[in-house]
Amino acid sequence: MNTYRKCQGRTLVSLREGALVGKLDDFQFDLEGRNIYGYRVKASGVFAKAGGVKATLIERVGRDVAFVDREDSVEWGQGSRNAAEGRAWASQYKGTRVMSRGGKMMGQVHDIVFDDQALQVLAIFLDEERWIGLEEGEVATGPAAVIVGKPEAVQALPKDLAPEDAWTRFKSSLSYKKNEGEEEE
């Protein structure tokens, strides 16, 4: 399982040439079928060029790097973020309203969970550490809002999946140092 936030900026490497190609920047997906069409790639450097690669050409999006078979799989100069009809870019979908069918505001899209092998968007993380699975058919993803059929589809995010913010990391490092100091005495 990958999320947009975790994969943004992940290094893209070509398997055939063993070369650094660039960094994953974004991905485009279909709002109805939730299929991933392609990734936006940025080359290295301050004034780096942008390009695109079809999702089917990405071999794997791993924990530290992503792999593409050949360096020329990336089409440079085609990295614009103009979404085709019925599609959305992950970066622009963040912040989209999540509402019930009755019009009650339930939150906003915070992150997008996807499977790079199945090329499918699986779930949406909401603000306040909640999530919605998309495989159940009770959720409609549209260009302006995510509509949830049953409010119970919005669930608390399991602790092992909860994003760790800077404050949480800071607090845990303090408690770790405190426990480490107690053991020495």
Image (spheres, rainbow, N blue to C red):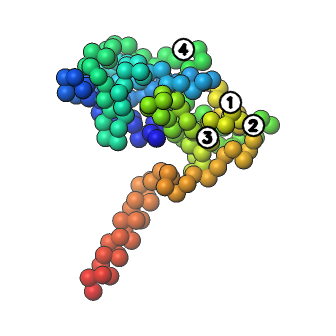
Q: Could you tell me residue 73's position as x and y percent?
A: 31, 16
Mark found first going from the N terminus, 2 or 1: 1
Badge 2 amino acid: Gly
Mark 1 — residue?
A: 140
Q: Could you tell me residue 3's position as x and y percent?
A: 46, 39
Tell me what residue is drawn at x 66 percent, y 33 percent. 146
Badge 1 amino acid: Ala
The crowding category of the residue bearing disc 1, from other C-alpha atoms within 10 Å (few below 14, some 14 to 19, many at least 20), is some
Mark 4 — residue?
A: 84
The answer to which quarter of the image holds residue 148 is top right
Q: Is residue 145 visible?
A: no
Q: In which quarter of the image is the C terminus?
A: bottom left
The answer to which quarter of the image holds residue 125 is top right
Give 63 or 183, whichever is nearer the viewer: 63
Tell me what residue is drawn at x 36 percent, y 31 percent. 60
The answer to which quarter of the image holds residue 50 is top left
The crowding category of the residue bearing disc 4, from other C-alpha atoms within 10 Å (few below 14, some 14 to 19, many at least 20), is few
Badge 3 amino acid: Gly
Q: Is residue 65 left or right of residue 122?
A: left
